[in-house]
Amino acid sequence: MEVAIVGAGFSGAVVAHLLAKSGHKCTVFEIRSHLGGNCYSERDPKTNVMKHVYGPHIFHTDNERVWNFVNQFSEFMPFVNRVKAITGGRVFSLPVNLLTINQFFNKTFSPSEAKAFIEQVAEKDIDEPQSFEDQALKFLGHDLYEAFFKGYTLKQWGIHPSDLPASILKRLPVRFNYDDNYFNHKYQGMPKNGYTEIFEKLLEHPLISLNLSSDFDPDSKSDFDHVFYSGPVDKYFKHKFGRLPYRTLDFEAFYAEGDYQGTAVINYCDEQVPYTRITEHKHFSPWEDHAHSICYREYSRSCGNGDIPYYPVKLLSEQGQLDSYIKLAKQEKNVTFLGRLGTYRYLDMDVTIAEAMIVAETFLLACEQGNTMPSWLEESK
């Protein structure tokens, strides 16, 4: 069969790789001039630092199958993300842990003492948190919420935390030990030669035709037996119900001699600081040695026409617009929507890859059994 794949990020590249290996001709359309989507990386010409062009991407997962899959295409080096946060003119560790609590409150709590203290200051009348603010107040209390989450969230989302769903604050935002590993996952690392190499290998197959700087017109879907669409779902339907809201990011790059901030990521939690964080890219490759440094100041704002969408904005009060697009998507024939933009969800890389593998396997099974491939998989709800 001949299939079109829209987008050369992880969703599209994984599907193209698996289908081509099974004998299907794949035409990949990528609107940007490079593959890899927001995971694209390249050597900075001035410092030779491996630069995460669209902001840092740290691979972390508990999915052994996904971990083994990506390790076919790159050597992954050990990397632990140890984030710092500046609030009120002081530096702390994130996520909030025992050191953070002791420093912030000028205490020397043991784990059990810290837990009892946080239970005492937490909002006890919030049974089922509905909003981001509820979630933070229930588990952290007012002071830690104000210091680390309120201002940062307002800058990141442009929306008050009381209007954002609790699911954005996915994990319990406090640890009662000194663990400052930002992620809890079993497998964590960075590709030794950057992410772009992975995409080049994924798409290196005689049955894959890669078209960069090429948009896909949904009206041409009949030219293919099937279309896998990882672009914005509202764009596919020509914004029939209006544009879905996204946040985009602006990066202010600057150079420094030596070591600028001593770590890869520092969050700036105070609302009056206009940027959300500073990232120093050479620290994402600690096995390399660089005399000079490139850093990004990161600013978040509402995504406009022509901007790169990063984060889908889901408000507690609004769901109807997205439901209308999902209803249309489910009615499409020979089109499958996938990925962060295609299903309007913020997905980590490992989840994106896992779902792309499921999509490809479902398609191959449908072909084998003569069934119809669904447009909106249950896993993508």
Image: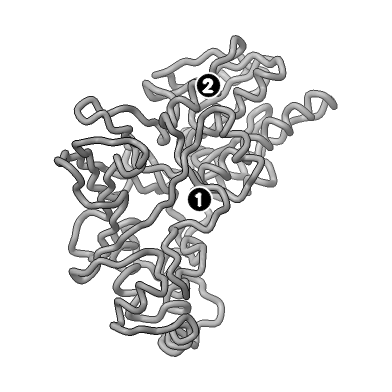
Q: Quadrant of residue 286?
A: top left
Q: Residue at x 55, y 29 (%)?
A: 12
- Residue 318, given in percent of the width and then of the height, sits at 48, 59
Residue 201: assigned label: 2
Q: Quadrant of residue 38?
A: top left
- Residue, x 14% and y 40% (percent of image)? 257
Identify the image quadrant of the N terminus.
top right
Picture disc at residue 130: none
Q: Is residue 168 above or below residue 44?
A: below
Under circle 2, the secondary element is: helix
Among all residues in the image, which is located at the extreme right?
369
Q: Within 10 angstroms of label 1, few (less than 14), some, or many (20 or more) residues?
A: some
The amino acid type of the residue labelled 1 equals Gln
> Disc 2 to disc 1, how far (Cα)?
38 Å
Q: Which residue is mark 1?
A: 321
Image vertical order of residue 227 relative to residue 142, above or below: above
- The color scheme shown is one colour
Hey, what amino acid is under mark 2? Lys
Residue 53, percent across and down?
A: 32, 34
Q: Residue furthest top?
A: 206
Residue 195, image x, y percentages: 44, 31
> Height in image: 218 above or below 132?
above
Q: How many marks do you count on the picture? A: 2
**Residue at left 37%, top 31%?**
41
SS state under label 1: helix
Drawn side of residue 165 relative to residue 255, left or right: right
For this rendering, which residue is in front, 156 or 183? 183
